[in-house]
Image (cartoon, coloured by chain):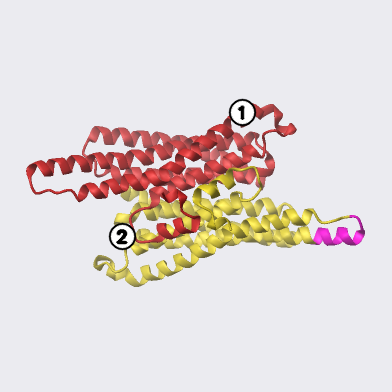
Chain colours: A red, B yellow
Amino acid sequence: MLIDLECNEYIEKLASGTPTPGGGSASALVGALASALVNMVANLTVGKEEFQEDEEEIREALKSAKKLHLSLQEYVDGDAEAFNKVMDSFRLPKDTEKEKKLRSETIQNAMVGAADLPLQVAGCCLDVLKLAEVVVEKGNPNALSDGGVAALLAFAALRGALYNVDINLGSIKDEELVAKLREKGEEVLDEAASLHDRVTKTVEDRLA
Amino acid sequence: MLIDLECNEYIEKLASGTPTPGGGSASALVGALASALVNMVANLTVGKEEFQEDEEEIREALKSAKKLHLSLQEYVDGDAEAFNKVMDSFRLPKDTEKEKKLRSETIQNAMVGAADLPLQVAGCCLDVLKLAEVVVEKGNPNALSDGGVAALLAFAALRGALYNVDINLGSIKDEELVAKLREKGEEVLDEAASLHDRVTKTVEDRLA
């Protein structure tokens, strides 16, 4: 599993000239790092008397962030697997009409999988951004920059995941599905962009 | 070493309630991932006939990206060590005037180190962004989204590193030095912001 590699090994593998892991897997990993940072700020907040007023909300954020970084860690491998399925489908035989038809269908299914998975990654990153706002607003101010970094990383990972949606949409023939996935991606991006701008502005105003 | 941890272990450690690793270390790691992605696109480009015209420039980018992700990997631990030095300096005795003076000087030196290190991380990330532009413009277009993700991650890591500069500047008493470090940070940020916007616009126009 990619997620079980040492950080330096993962980086070496990413740098190599093999198509996986690539930007999709790296985006999921960065999303997981962002979620872990939210988790860290929440951990530095709960149980401290001065933040008792928001204790329950921070505890909820802690629980959700934990779930999110576990999901995003799975997508680090999931993205590479979805891409490998696409590569495999292109290697299917295409000598007979029947083989051609089966190959074409398998390619299409694999492409839909390869577009849908990073869309799920983007959705998780949006949720991380929402939690980043909670810990920036109500978490331990000593960890303000960590909450800010979480927001920066979650948004970059989200956009990176959407690049991986877009690059696969071009090969999907079902136009209705393409339109649906594209619309979903745009919705996620719009919501995330406002959140990111708001959270980073708060952090930067306080750091200045 | 943090960089030798498995990715999932690093994420767990980041998520925990200990102050290191935090957003500074994570920013260096994300910068290293961005640089590795540049490296990947360059690897998928060199030696291919259709990109021969730009072969030399891509080879240079490959070499520089390799150096950068090695430096950034070192900063993953370096940032945590710089922060730990700050924590240690606060634990020095302060019973006599001599001890007070020594403690205060040690704290100041540690703070300067903790501000300077992420500034170096930000500088490396700016260099990664420059290389991301090269591989997006002249690299294998099949890896366009990977070059795009490299630019997104490098810029987020750069801003994250600068948050860690800013949070330490507040505790440095040498106003001239603070002004110098702040100015340097702003320069890096300005140049990076234009680069990031240009590269991501190119990628997004081509993906649309």
- Above or below, A148 against A49 in this view is below
- The x, y position of residue B188, in whole percent, is 56, 59
Q: Is residue A76 left or right of residue B158?
A: left
Q: Residue B183, located in which quarter of the rendered image?
A: bottom right
Q: Amino acid type of disc 1?
A: Glu
Q: Of helix, strand and loop, which one carries label 2?
A: loop
Mark 1 Cα shell of 10 Å, populated few (<14), some (14-19), many (≥20): some
Q: According to the image, label 2 marks what residue?
A: B140
Looking at the image, how many numbered discs can be counted on the residues? Answer: 2
Which of label 1 and label 2 is nearer to you?
1
Residue sitting at x 52%, y 46%: A33
Residue span colored magenta: B95-105
State the separation of the CA atoms marked 1 and 2. Answer: 47 Å
Residue A57: mark: 1
Along the viewing direction, whichever of B180 and A80 lies nearer the viewer: A80
Q: Residue A59, located in which quarter of the rendered image?
A: top right
